[in-house]
Image: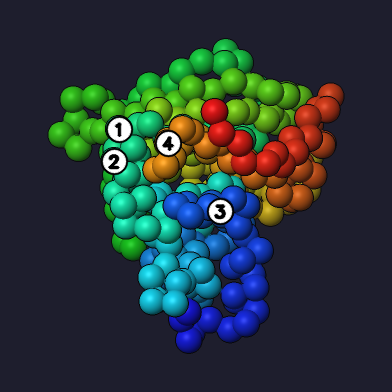
Amino acid sequence: MSASLTPDDIAFARSLAIYEDAHVLVLNKPAGLSSQGGRIAANTLNDLLAAFAKSNGKRPRLIHRLDRDTSGVILTAKTQPGAAFLGKAMMARRIRKTYFAIVAPGAPDPREGLIEASLRRESQGREAYTRVCPPDHPDAQDASTRYRTLEAGPSAALVELSPRTGRMHQLRVHLASIGRPIIGDPRYGGALMLSGAPVPRLMLHAAALSFPHPAGGERKVTAPIPDDMAAIIAQIEGAPIHPRNQDASHA
């Protein structure tokens, strides 16, 4: 276990675990915590994995990342064979992710569909951005996102997102490209106020993850919507949805 982690750090890290077996550890990352490599002098989720280290010092490995202000399910492997297996599954697009996002203004038009827009990365100073670009651009990467509206009011809507690719900031840029940026996302035009109240952060949550398991079969792990996001969902006109946490399951 890393000497740099305090007892409070270790307790916090362990509180994030939502599913664990001999091969994998699944965490519910809070918003505001970098997955790894953050520029601020604070522990990242990758640092906190030291709280789960074995006696030989080996600790779980991240299989993918979430943006710092995105909350929700993140997958790690507890063994090297597991990491290799899941890494290949990620490359083969066998790991399926489901997100919830709050967008404005109102529901997308149409209310559900498939966004297929190539993306490219660019830098402005120390900041990295993703932009929609023509598919024949030399830096273009194919990207597709399926979406459907779950609840909608005149000022905002809750949408479910199923990305088919995993490009940087893909969901944020794709939703902005159809005129419905995620609220709390100033980088891509998201509103910072909703119904006269400030939006505390990027309203994007990784709600579920389905993946082939190194030991066989498939697992699906879900994470509850954080309180700050649930409070905004409750303000959407006619919104009865309050997704609840579910136990990890396998198919």
Q: At 60% from the left edge and 76% from the top edge, which residue is drawn? A: 9
Residue hosting label 1: 92
Q: Which one is closest to the eye, mark 3 or mark 1?
A: 3
Q: How many labels does the image show?
A: 4
Q: Which one is closest to the eye, mark 2 or mark 4?
A: 4
Q: Do the residues labelled 1 and 2 touch (CB within 8 Å)?
A: yes
Circle 2 sits in a helix, a strand or a loop, which is it?
helix
* Quarter of the image where the C terminus is located: top right
Q: What residue type is labelled 1?
A: Ala
Q: Which amino acid does label 2 sit on?
A: Lys
Q: Distance between the residues labelled 1 and 2?
A: 6 Å
| Residue 161 placement, left or right of 59 | right
Residue hosting label 2: 88
Q: In this view, does 127 lie above or below 106?
A: below
- Residue 156 place in picture, x, y as percent: 70, 31
- Residue 104 place in picture, x, y as percent: 64, 32
Residue 20 circle label: 3
Residue 216 circle label: 4
Q: How far apart are marks 4 and 1 (CA)?
A: 16 Å
